[in-house]
Amino acid sequence: MRVLSRWCWLLLLAYCQLRLHAGEVVTIHLRPTSEVAAPRATLGEVADLSGDDAALIARMRALVVQELPDAAPRTLDPQVIRMAIGRAVPGIPLIVRGHCRLTRAVEVVSGERLAAAAQAHAVTALEGRGAVRSEVARSSGPLSVPSEAGSPPDVVAEPLTAPAPGETAYRVRVLRHGRELARALVVLRVRLFATVPVAARALARGSVIGAGDVRMAPVEAGVGEAPAPELAAVVGAITTRDIAEGAPLAGRLLQAAPAVRGGTTVTLIVHGPGLTLTAVATALGDGAIGERIQVRRGTDGKNVAARVEAPGQVVAER
């Protein structure tokens, strides 16, 4: 009788427990496929839930059932779901059906955006050297990265060599929260333009350049090319060869106009101990400021060496 009584109590307890949980059974139907735009998937994003306890169902829908650090697909089965729920809400009677192929949504970072990052870096790196124009010579193409709602990725370009006119290679990285998602290679063909004096008309060799012979225009700078002279240094200079209209007036094509012309009268300055004398002399050759020429003194007809100091003025050399 005691054994029978004990079994009756056990059966009664089991029956009561079944009655207690009968209304708490949650049925979970995994969807065949699901795509989420987040680094983790919740139960509500991969399955349809039903049950009598609305508060419990709402809580379970928010449970994280799978981490998604990348865009690789995952398959969720009933065992995975039971384990995820058991860790968060133990003791809930479950009915789980189906399988779900879970993927993370991706977004495409266009080749144009990757190239724009490299081009912006080139402009900043060459700032002050002229106007930068660039085009894409080669590119590894657009990148697909996992998407995340409300958190667009950053694009950072890093040159593999110092930016300069010609081809420059860039490593372009796509980041989110400082973590690299993907990278691409972009090679730019960079051109540098400077606004310099150019010939406003064709100029013959030996021409003295006047203000009307010059205009300013953007000209592509060559690799290692010397800087173009300033406008003030061009006007009044003499061409050393024929120059076509529109050609840059580079320093190698010009020579300074002589401050003293041969055969003209100049003032000769003679510096002595504690005194300075001046005399009239005749220049025996052309000379720019700073150049050494010969002059003939008017007082005795003697030739002396002198340095051109200013237009019409020379200083006798000791």
Image (cartoon, helix red, strand yellow):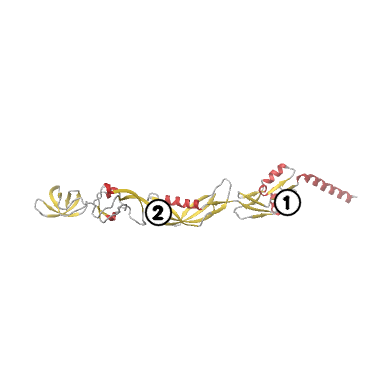
- Discs 2, 1 touching: Cβ within 8 Å: no
For residue 257, side relative to residue 174 (left or right): left
Percent of width and height locating residue 57: 71, 44
Q: Mark 2 and mark 1: span between their CA atoms?
A: 64 Å
Percent of width and height locating residue 51: 74, 45
Residue 272 visible to the viewer:
no
**Mark 2 surroundings within 10 Å by alpha-carbon count, few (fewer than 14), some (14 through 19), many (20 or more):** some
Percent of width and height locating residue 155: 51, 51
Looking at this view, name the residue that lies furthest to the right. 1
**Mark 1 surroundings within 10 Å by alpha-carbon count, few (fewer than 14), some (14 through 19), many (20 or more):** some
Q: Secondary structure at mark 2?
A: strand
For residue 6, side relative to residue 221 (left or right): right
Q: Nearer the viewer, mark 2 or mark 1?
A: 2
Q: Secondary structure at mark 1?
A: strand
Q: Callout 2, which amino acid?
A: Arg
Q: Which residue is mark 2?
A: 191
Q: Callout 1, which amino acid?
A: Val
For residue 29, side relative to residue 261 (left or right): right
Figure quadrant of the C terminus: bottom left
Disc sitting over residue 96 in the figure: 1
Residue 61 visible to the viewer:
yes
Q: Residue at x 84, y 49 (%)?
A: 11
For residue 256, side relative to residue 166 (left or right): left
Nearer the observer, 283 or 308: 283
Percent of width and height locating residue 52: 75, 43
